Every structure is written in structure tokens, then in C-alpha cells.
Image (cartoon, rainbow, N blue to C red):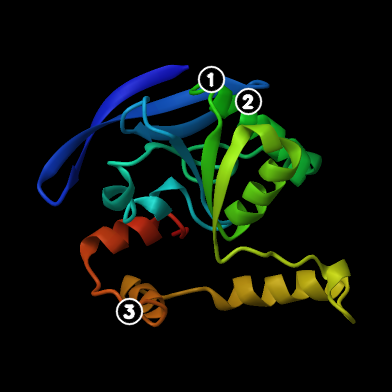
Amino acid sequence: MELVGLIYKIKGVILELKEFKITVDNHVFHGYEFGENSLPSLVCLHGMTGDLKSFSGLIEYLINDFHLILLDNPGHGETGPLELEDDYRFSALVNRIYRVIQKITNKPFYILGHSWGADLALNFAKIHPNKIIGLILIDGGYVFPEHVGGMTKEKALLGWKKYIESSKYSSWDEVVKEYQDYTTKQWDTSLDSIIISNLKR
């Protein structure tokens, strides 16, 4: 495990965080640790188009109560994609991420999962029930085609293709407007840094 110290500023208070790069099965996982190891660990798993920055707005509310572990899932942020499609099956991905977490802490931990990360969290609880203290699930429940009446894999893939093709913007202002429509929070530059990593130029 490679650790590098960095600084994070919240409301004028400077916090030290540790950036890590952990190799499991010849694959390097990137992430950050915040807070005291003596506190209960909370592993944060982001959604499919996000990265660990998705949780930056929550850090100030969690840092006094948890040892935070923020992880870029494979193919997101600064963690490269996995080689095989089967590597993304929930069971395979959970076991690989679990081995990453075990290199940081061997104590039971909480999981905070958003969207796809919430589905990963549920699979964690199923596969490693004795290691999970509790789950916090935000906007989870990705539905597989076979669980929806009349839905097929082909229809689902066509829907995703249409969504991806409709998600093209000609300016940063268009992107910000799209996100502003989904939030009640006053917009500021810290939100820019969260969403910019979701987009390709």
C-alpha cells in the first residue's frame, strides 16, 4: 500500500488525509482515508458515473464520528478499469474491494453506498455479513431487466444508449444547469469539482 499525505480544508479547518494506492490482483485501487483509526470505519462506495469526490460534501458531517475510507471503484476516478466483464459481477467486485479494505482495516465497518454503490453495499452485507456493522443506502436499487415485467436486456441497453447519446453538452453552463435542476442546494464551485469528474471532454 502506498500512502501520501494531503490537506483538505472544510469551513476554514484544515484536515490531513491520506491518499492511498492499493494493489489487489495486479490492479491498483485509488482512494483516501480521513479521520482517526480508533473511530468506526465507514467505507463510501459511489455510483456508476461518479467517483470518490461524490462524497466530499458529506465529509464535514462525518469526520468527527468515523474513520472514512473513500474509494474510486474500478473504471472511475483514478482507479483504472478491470480487464474482464466478469470482473464487474457484484460478487467478484465485492470480494476484490473487500481485500482492498482489509489492507486498511481488519475491523468490521459501516458502508455508505450511493446508487450502484448501494447495490455493492447490499452484496457486501450478503457475502461478508460478519464484517458489516451497518449500511447506509442512498438512491440504490438498480433494477435488472429480468426483474421488470416486459423488459429485456436489449430494451435496457437501448434505453442506456439513448440516455448516453442525450447526455452531450455544448458548454459547461449547460452541464451546470442540468445539475442545478436536480439540487436544491445553492450552487458553488465545490459542486463544480464534484461533477466535472463525471464528464468527458
Numbered mark located on residue 184 in the image: 3
Q: Nearer the viewer, residue 178 or 161?
A: 178
Q: Position of residue 146 (x, y in %)?
A: 88, 68
Can you tell which quarter of the image residue 75 is in? top right
Q: Amino acid at mark 3?
A: Thr
Q: Amino acid at mark 2?
A: Arg
Q: Nearer the viewer, residue 38 or 174?
A: 38
C-alpha distance separating marks 2 and 1: 7 Å
Q: Are marks 2 and 3 in contact (CB under 8 Å)?
A: no
Numbered mark located on residue 99 in the image: 2
Residue under label 1, please give it. 103
C-alpha distance separating marks 1 and 3: 38 Å
Q: Is disc 1 placed on a helix, strand or loop?
A: loop
First-in-chain label (2 vs 3): 2
Q: Position of residue 130 (x, y in %)?
A: 67, 33
Q: Amino acid at mark 1?
A: Lys
Label 3: few (<14), some (14–19) or many (≥20) C-alpha neighbours in 10 Å:
few
